[in-house]
Image (cartoon, grey):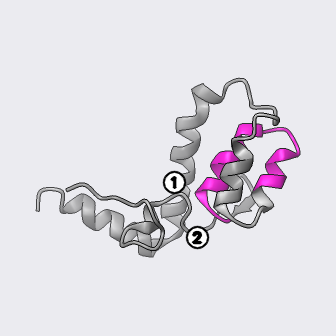
Amino acid sequence: MTIYFYSIREEYGCFSNFSPHGFELDGLYWSTSEHYFQAQKFVGTSHVEQIRLVKTPKDAAKMGRERTRPLRQDWEQVKDDIMRQAVLCKFKTHTDIRDILTFHRKCRNC
């Protein structure tokens, strides 16, 4: 069964990187996994904090895609692990969405 989660307002919207499920990672609080992912493109610069503090994940995504910002050189090599770390932390932090994920993993063959 394929699960789609394009909108945070839909049934599985909690799986979206835009879902309002904040978490603490690297000693900082992140409003969404999108905030974390986009900010990691600029580790070691003031852009990290600017993106972390922006109000919406849409704004974080927009800022992270601005090519006027200094993209880290190893981004292509580390981006998948960074996303994996953010999503793992999000689901460890929020038991309600972890339970949804766990249920669907168990029922793959339903």
**Number of numbered discs overlaid on the protein picture:** 2
State which region is magenta: 31-51
Q: Tell me if I can see residue 69 in this picture.
A: yes
- Determine the CA span between mark 1 and mark 2: 12 Å
Viewed as shown, does residue 76 lie left or right of 30? left
Which secondary structure lies at badge 1? helix
Q: Please state the horizontal and vertical placement of residue 3, each as a whole percent of the image.
A: 29, 58
- Chief secondary structure of the magenta span? helix
Q: Amino acid at mark 1?
A: Val
**Residue sitting at 72 percent across and 24 percent down?**
73
Q: Label 1: which residue?
A: 87
**Residue sitting at 77 percent across and 61 percent down?**
54
Assign the N terminus to one quadrant of the image: bottom left
**Residue sitting at 51 percent across and 54 percent down?**
87
Query: Pointer 1 and pointer 2: residues touching (CB < 8 Å)?
Result: no
Q: Quadrant of residue 5?
A: bottom left
Q: Please state the horizontal and vertical placement of residue 64, each as a whole percent of the image.
A: 71, 44
Q: Please state the horizontal and vertical placement of residue 98, each as a whole percent of the image.
A: 41, 67
Q: Tell me if I can see residue 24 in this picture.
A: no
Q: Label 2: which residue?
A: 20
The stretch drawn in magenta includes residue 33? yes
Q: Is residue 19 above or below residue 108?
A: below
Residue count near mark 2 (Cα–Cα under 10 Å), binned few <14, some 14–19, many ≥20: some
Q: Nearer the viewer, residue 63 or 17?
A: 63
Q: Amino acid at mark 2?
A: Pro
The stretch drawn in magenta includes residue 67? no
Q: Is residue 58 above or below residue 68?
A: below
Q: Nearer the viewer, residue 24 or 20?
A: 20
**Residue sitting at 57 percent across and 52 percent down?**
86
Q: Is residue 73 above or below residue 81?
A: above
Residue count near mark 1 (Cα–Cα under 10 Å), binned few <14, some 14–19, many ≥20: many
